[in-house]
Image: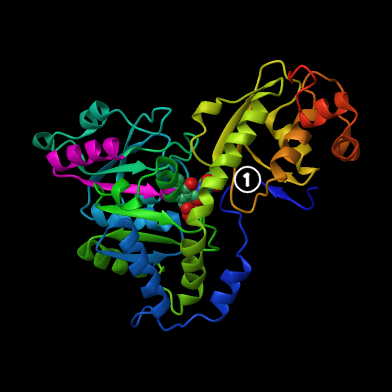
Amino acid sequence: MVTGRVDLRSDTVTKPSEAMRAAMANAEVDDDVLCYDPTALCLETEMARLTGKQAAIFVPSGTMGNLISVLVHCEIRGSEVILGDKSHIHIYENGGISTIGGVHPRTVKNNEDGTMDIDLIEAAIRDPKLDICYPVTRLICLENTHGSCGGKCLSVEYTARVGDLAKKHGLKLHIDGARIFNASVALGVPVHRLVQAADSVSVCLSKGLGAPVGSVIVGSKAFIARAKTLRKTLGGGMRQVGVLCAAALVAVQHNIGKLEGDHKKAKSLAEGLNGIKGLKVDVSSVETNIIFFDILEGANITAPKLCKNLEEHGILVLPGSSSTIRLVLHYQISETDVPYTLSCIRVMDYEASFYPGPIGINLLFKTATQVPFIPILQKAVMGVPDENGGK
Ligand SMILES: Cc1ncc(COP(=O)(O)O)c(C=O)c1O
Ligand SMILES: C[C@@H](O)[C@H](N)C(=O)O
């Protein structure tokens, strides 16, 4: 039986584990601006190893990881970056590359699978012979997995093709790898192969890996040296940061193996949602831990209203639009949380004019799970197949 909250708003919501808290309390620390905090150095060395890059630095957030990376690659005024029109950097980072770095964004349409067509990327590269009119293209950014495209994975092959294009035109390649470990686990490919073509990667430790804070930028030694200076400029130089890096080390050491479970729970939740009249999910498109589902025309509920109804049962989700809801799985979602979530969504019959309310739903859920001989109720609440196997 589920108790408390089922927080599906994002994989950024996890609380530090007891092991993380113990590691934080006992972390060996020093002033990371004046020298090297030993725990930060340990984390950065491990992340450089895992990603196959020369060096790494710890930063407070993925937003700062992307900002620093773009600004180092585009430190000459009048620079332009090519990025996806649905990319996190373009949509969710307050336009920081422009407002802080003066870098001009040039968007290319994101396909549903998170890629951008290679020919459209090449067409977006400015002709250097006309530089008196144009900004100068200096960087291409990819996002793997792609958050707004449902957690889709970019393949090694696609990333290598974009890398070849960047080299052909003397450009750099940055990967927003907030969920690169999800892509690695889903594709069965080591992270260092997925990012081989990239000059820099920003990796979030505070998402599916479950660290309370932080990201790491990886790249060449020269790139990381410039990134470290810019981190200080932006106020991201931290003192005894080992307290945070200790938790991140626990996350990297213990939680990569849990990502596959997140993906399995996402698939199971998507399949259950797809069986509910009034909702639509493309189950085959759920590759990792993110689900977007649609509320169909004619259903007598909007996404914000459904979010509110679910919140009354302790289930927290975020609307993607007026008719779409996003669910993000993480390792603190238990096996029973998935059927409980489905039972709460299932009972809110989208054609019914009434809604039994939280007390009604909890009563139905308890009855259906503890009095299994009422098949009609079980079917309504749990979606279990009836004697003919139907739903
Ligand atoms: C794809 C992607 N990139 C970057 C970020 C930024 O990370 P942070 O929230 O730590 O700034 C997020 C989400 O938070 C994200 O989903
Ligand atoms: C919304 C976005 O900023 C955040 N990274 C998330 O996926 O929850």
Q: Is residue 208 visible?
A: no
* Residue 263, position as x, y percentages in the image: 54, 42
Number of dots carrying numbers? 1
- 295 is higher (above) or lower (below) than 1: above
* Residue 66, position as x, y percentages in the image: 37, 53
Mark 1 close to ligand 2, CB under 8 Å: yes
Q: Amino acid at mark 1?
A: Arg
Q: Which residue is mark 1?
A: 9
* Residue 136, position as x, y percentages in the image: 19, 42
* Residue 146, position as x, y percentages in the image: 43, 39
State the SS at label 1: loop
At label 1, counting other C-alpha atoms closer than 10 Å, the crowd grade (few under 14, some 14-19, many 20 or more) is: some
Quarter of the image where one finds residue 308? top right
Residue at point 28%, 35% (across, down): 158
Q: Which segment did they paint magenta?
A: 156-180
Horizontal side, residue 284 vs residue 168: left or right: right
Residue at point 38%, 48% (across, down): 176
Residue at point 28%, 57% (across, down): 52
Quadrant containing the C terminus is: top right
| Residue with the most extreme left position | 129
> Is residue 367 found inside the magenta-colored segment of the image?
no
| Residue with the most extreme front position | 387
